[in-house]
Amino acid sequence: MFDVRCQKLISEFGLRSLLNELDISKKKLTVAQAMAIAIYEAYQGAQRVSPNPLVGCVILDSHGQFLSKGHHEVYGQAHAEINALKGLDKEQLQDATMIVTLEPCAHVGKTGSCALQIKDLPVKRVIYGLVDPFHLVAGKGAQILRDSGKEAIVYADYVGMDNNGQESRLLNQQLEILAENFLKNSRAQKPFVALKWAQSLDGKMALKNYQSQWITGELSRTYAHYLRSIYDGLIVGSGTILQDNPKLNIRLENFSKESKLVIIDPEATVYKTFESLELSRYHKKENIFFIVDAKSASSAAVFDFSAQAPGAFKNILFLNRGTSGFFSMQDIYQFCFERGMKSLLVEGGPSLIHQCLKQNAFDRIYAFVAPILMGNGLGYTDELPITSMNQKMQFTALEKIELGDDLLVTGLNWTYCYPIG
């Protein structure tokens, strides 16, 4: 499925027509065009490569003509460079240039080292988008290539030869966005967190009676399932479950995956009634995680704290609610990260989305906006502590796409701490 994050890349480089031309003839490409294609190619693995990064690769022959492309398709299987090399012989690779979105790996893990395989090929140079921050790579892959007599150049250093500052800035931004999950994990040892919600034009997520089905149309709802498919964990509040009794699974044609489900359940209400809910039919218990109020009388009746320490419940986090009456989202995120959830999609109701915004506990938003008015409904920003325009919440690297009559807008938190241009 098309990923909205590369909408700008597609339009700026005319990728749809460019890719069609590649299918017809051996086209000469600039390095910038090749990098744009590599980024677009990388997104084809978005649903299957976690916790590895999305990576794409394009190979040009000695005259700069397109030879092949590839991406990392499935976690534990061949990386992008190896997939791009398939079917090419040494004669075709003589003095060729490989353009890859991330530094070739230096270490042997579930697959062999890409750098070690490339060093024995007659490739002239490798231009890579980002230095891999993982400590077992982090410059080592590029050094292996240089030691074998090849050029290994990070794209930001190469762009002086490319002579197009606007293209270079866009591509550097897009490279960071492509790897945003992996970069947050490696640089901060935290999960990448996205908020997803559907709203009316007047900013309402539900009516006063909590009815919210359906604000958006079928295309938006299908795209929401795509978003579920590219994140490791889904976070929801107990109110959403008790009100809507949802399945919270991934319903996409020809795709099967069960993500981890994190339920913020202060009074253990969902926990107690789990067997009667739709969730019980679509999720294995080992993939469900509960966040429970450690001081709640209701939850104490379910969990005997004196008989069994909270640590004995591997899928339950007992937290104290803060002065605001809500949990620390960062504590929840850390709990998830330690249990293998490197990326999280928060898909709660107005209260949960409000708390994430209030705590500034998110990296990206996905807002589905429907062309309707809901009047005196439930919003998610009504009580945000903003009293002057200097405090307004801002977003950067914005992208948008029309989904039928709806509009999907996505962007990064303005305080996102990495160099996104």
Image: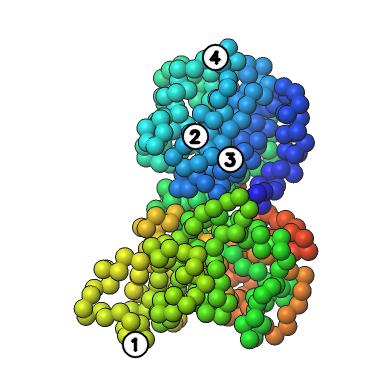
Amino acid at pointer 3: Ala
Q: Residues within 10 Å of mark 2 (few under 14, many from 20)?
A: many
Instruction: Point out the tag, 1 or 2, that comes first from the N-terminus.
Output: 2
Marker disc for residue 42: 3
**Residue 225 percent location from the top left of the image:** 60, 59
Q: For numbered disc 2, what is the local secondary structure?
A: loop
Marker disc for residue 90: 4
Q: For numbered disc 1, what is the local secondary structure?
A: helix
**Residue at the disc numbered 2:** 79
**Residue at the disc numbered 1:** 297
| Nearer to us in this view, 314 or 43 | 314
Q: For numbered disc 4, what is the local secondary structure?
A: helix
Instruction: Point out the tag, 2 or 3, that comes first from the N-terminus.
Output: 3
**Residue 270 percent location from the top left of the image:** 45, 77
Instruction: Give yes or no for contact between labels 3 and 1 (Cβ–Cβ under 8 Å).
Output: no
Instruction: Point out the tag, 1 or 4, that comes first from the N-terminus.
Output: 4
Amino acid at pointer 1: Ala
Q: Marks 1/4: CA distance?
A: 70 Å
Asked whether, in this view, residue 267 is left or right of residue 204, the answer is left
Instruction: Point out the tag, 3 or 4, that comes first from the N-terminus.
Output: 3
| Nearer to us in this view, 198 or 165 | 198
Residue at position x 56%, y 72% in the image = 246
Residue at position x 67%, y 48% in the image = 2
Question: Could you say which quadrant of the image residue 287 lies in?
Answer: bottom left
